Image: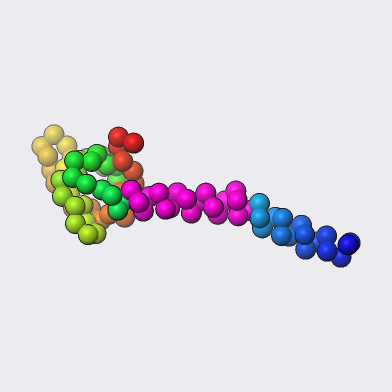
Amino acid sequence: MQQYAGLIMSIAFIGIFYFLLIRPQQKRDKELKEMRANLKVGDEVVTIGGLVGKIFNVTEDMVTVEVGGDKTRLHVEKWAIGKMKNK
């Protein structure tokens, strides 16, 4: 039994590492992908660069975002959307 103690401890550390670090990160990535896939016109979003605006148009991989009081339209790739403003 003494010879298996090191193996059991290694497996335990791998399990703890998985449930505390890897699994939560995978869950956040999945939620972010779903949010980006479900973007629609009128949603308020924040880009990873910090720009806040309202979605004007959505295509397969690009989003047009209106920002500012003069309604400037910026074309942003979907991966650059960091979060929904109202959620």
Q: Is residue 58 magenta?
A: no
Q: Residue at x 30, y 34 (%)?
A: 86
Q: Residue at x 29, y 46 (%)?
A: 47
Q: Is residue 28 visible?
A: yes
Q: Is residue 53 above or below residue 4?
A: above
Q: Classify residue 34 as left or right of residue 68.
A: right
Q: Nearer the viewer, residue 26 or 82?
A: 26
Residue 8 in percent (x, y) is at 77, 59
Query: Majority secondary structure of the magenta segment?
Result: helix
Q: Classify residue 38 as left or right of residue 75.
A: right
Q: Is residue 24 magenta?
A: yes
Residue 65 in percent (x, y) is at 19, 46
- Please provide the residue range marked out in magenta: 17-35
Residue 11 in percent (x, y) is at 71, 60
State how the image is colored: rainbow
Specify the quadrant that holds the N terminus.
Answer: bottom right
Residue 78 in percent (x, y) is at 27, 54
Residue farthest toward the right in the current orientation of the protein: 2
Q: Is residue 8 above or below residue 39?
A: below
Q: Residue at x 18, y 45 (%)?
A: 41
